[in-house]
Each structure stands twice: as C-alpha cells, then as structure tokens.
Amino acid sequence: MPENPLINDQTAGIERLLEIMRRLRDPKSGCPWDIEQDFTSIAPYTIEEAYEVADAIERQDWPELEGELGDLLLQSVYHTQMGEEAGHFSFQSVVRNISDKMVARHPHVFGDESRDKSAAQQTRDWEAIKAAERAGKAQQGTLDGVAVGLPALLRAYKLQKRAARVGFDWPSAQNVLDKIAEESAELVEARDELTQEAIEEEFGDLLFVMANLGRHLGVEPEAALRRANAKFTRRFEGVETKLAERGKSPSESNLDEMDALWDAVKADERSKNPSP
C-alpha cells in the first residue's frame, strides 16, 4: 500500500491520527493485534487511560499529562474507527454529537438566556436539560443513565446524587453517621454469625453509606480515596527507605518496628508541611 503523506506530516493534527488508526486497522496491511480488537477488548484500556490522566493531574505533572491526554484521545479515535467500520458512527459524527450537546446545554452562552446566574442555578439548569435528554431517549427512571461500567464507588456516589434530586435523601450528615454506626454493627454481626456472602453484602452496604457521607460533606469519594492511596504509598515508601538505612527490607522487619517508622515518616511530613 502506498504511504499516505499524512502519516509523517507532524503538522496534520487530528487527521494524521485518524489516518494512523485507519492503517493500524487495515485488514490487509495493518497491525494483527489492532485488527483483532473490538469495543469490549479496548474498553478496559480506555478506563485505564482516563485514570492515568487523573493521576498526572493529581501529581501536577504537566509534561506527563500531555502524553496521557494523547493516549486518552487515541482511545476515542480507536472506538470511532471501529464504529465506522461497523457502520454505527464516525469520528466526525461523534464530534458533531458532542458539539451539538454542548451548544444545547449552554443556552446562557450560545443562546438567548441570561448569563446572570449563580453556579448553583447553572448546575440545576444543566441537570434539567440532561433530564429532558434522558426523557427523549425513553430513560424515564430516576437512575437511568448512570453508567453500569463506572467504578463502583463513583457509581454509588452518582446514584445517590440522582436519588437525592427527587427527595430520596437523609436530611443531614448526622443521619448518615447514624446509619454508618448501624451498618458497622451489622457487619460485626455478620462476621461473627453469618456466611461469607452475608459479610460481603454488609461490607458493601457500609461502603455505600460511606459514599453517601462523602456527598453530604461535599467530598467526592473516588477522589478522596485516590488521595488516601497516594498518601499510603508515599508513607510506606518512606518506611522502606528508613528500613533500608538500617540494612533491612520489610520482610526482615516486624509490625512494631514498621509502625514506629510509619509514625516517624508522618512526623517528618508534618515538620516539612506544618499546619497553618
């Protein structure tokens, strides 16, 4: 196949990337791995790339973010190429769809509505427009449209937000805290008396209520847990560093020693970043 000049034209922008993907998927001259893929096999990579974007943002690594955004864009191009091959949609139709949606959802920018609204009012208007869109798609239920494929903690948060819009919500964070105490007691009971399946169910209930507490406190639980994971990783690596200074690895230590080193790492952090 003669080489398309777009392939090596670094100034060609999105058209170059679209042509690269077309070549990768060409059944005669493309990459065997790329040719074998379908929507289902590529979906996990799409999710992974989105999280890598979030990770780069969390670390404020802007050169890394540039690369990760490119990887995420490639995922959209990959799915649209497969969609075009199957006759479902194309890259251009996807772009047209999202452009039309943004214009329709921002009448205060692209239409005649006033921009003199609070952020809270704009959010309410946005949700009303989305509700009308769901109605047009025959999605009548309150929870329709909350993607099943979302990470479970994030989906719990979104389900609870959607239910709260129609009044199905606890009045205050204190009510949620009371429910957490109740669910914790039920989990202890399940641990002592019930089956593993029952333990898993009660544990899930507790996680679900914890996500709801986050919503009442204005905390997005997925983001909070990512930060907690990052903090744990940072501090445990600090423990490993201190052990290495003693000529040890974690497997050659014990809980008492590592716990003391953990406290030392925390103290080091506080001394470098004292609270105001």
Image: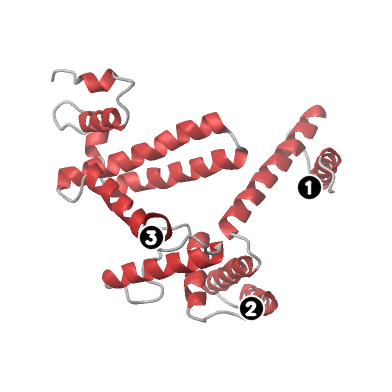
Q: Which residue is mark 3?
A: 105
Q: Position of residue 174 (x, y in %)?
A: 70, 77
Foreground label between 3 and 1: 3
Callout 2 secondary element = helix
Quick check: marks 1 and 2 in contact, CB under 8 Å?
no
Q: Position of residue 275 (x, y in %)?
A: 84, 48
Amino acid residing under circle 2: Glu
Mark sitting on residue 255: 1
Q: On the picture, is 54 further left or further right than 137? A: right
- Residue at 56%, 79% (x, y): give it: 169
Q: Which residue is mark 2?
A: 186
Q: Position of residue 60 (x, y in %)?
A: 60, 37
Toward the viewer: 156 or 115?
115
Label 2 vs label 3: CA separation?
Answer: 44 Å
Foreground label between 2 and 3: 3
Label 1 vs label 2: CA separation?
Answer: 29 Å
User: Badge 3: how crowded within 10 Å, few (<14), some, or many (20+)?
Assistant: many
Amino acid residing under circle 1: Leu
Amino acid residing under circle 3: Arg
Quick check: marks 3 and 1 in contact, CB under 8 Å?
no
Q: Position of residue 85 (x, y in %)?
A: 16, 43
User: Badge 2: how crowded within 10 Å, few (<14), some, or many (20+)?
Assistant: some
